[in-house]
Image (cartoon, grey):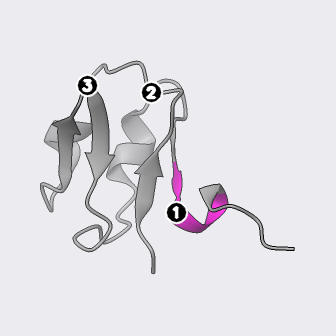
Amino acid sequence: MNGYVINAECVLCGLCVPVCPEHCIEVIDLRYIIDSAACTECDECLRVCPVDAIHHAEETAPKED
């Protein structure tokens, strides 16, 4: 389990923050960041994101050759 990340498609709506039961989403430098160590992958943030900007961390990791 690697948790979720919020990508650059985020529109800063803030809908994900109050639904996170672990309170692991915060704003840093005008970006929403998910603390992957605290994320339990409950999917609550995925359900409310209007632009699908939240993904599993491994989906956004750079591919190795």
Estimate the x, y position of residue 10 in percent, counting from the top left: 44, 27
Label annotation for residue 47: none
Estimate the x, y position of residue 39 in percent, counting from the top left: 29, 67
| Sequence-wise first label, 1 or 2 | 2
Element assignment for label 2: loop
| Sequence-wise first label, 1 or 3 | 3
Are dots 1 and 2 in contact, CB under 8 Å?
A: no
Circle 1 packing at 10 Å, graded few (<14), some (14-19), many (20+), is: some
Label annotation for residue 57: 1
Are dots 1 and 3 in contact, CB under 8 Å?
A: no
The quarter of the displayed image where residue 31 is located: top left
Q: Which residue, given by chain and number where applicable, does mark 3 sit on?
A: 30
Camera-side mark, 1 or 3: 3
Mark 2 residue type: Cys
Camera-side mark, 2 or 3: 3
Toward the right, the furthest residue is 65
At horizontal 31% and vertical 72% (from top left) the residue drawn is 40
Q: Main secondary structure of the magenta part?
A: helix
Element assignment for label 1: helix
Nearer-the-camera pick, 62 or 4: 62
User: What range of the chain is rendered magenta?
Assistant: 55-59
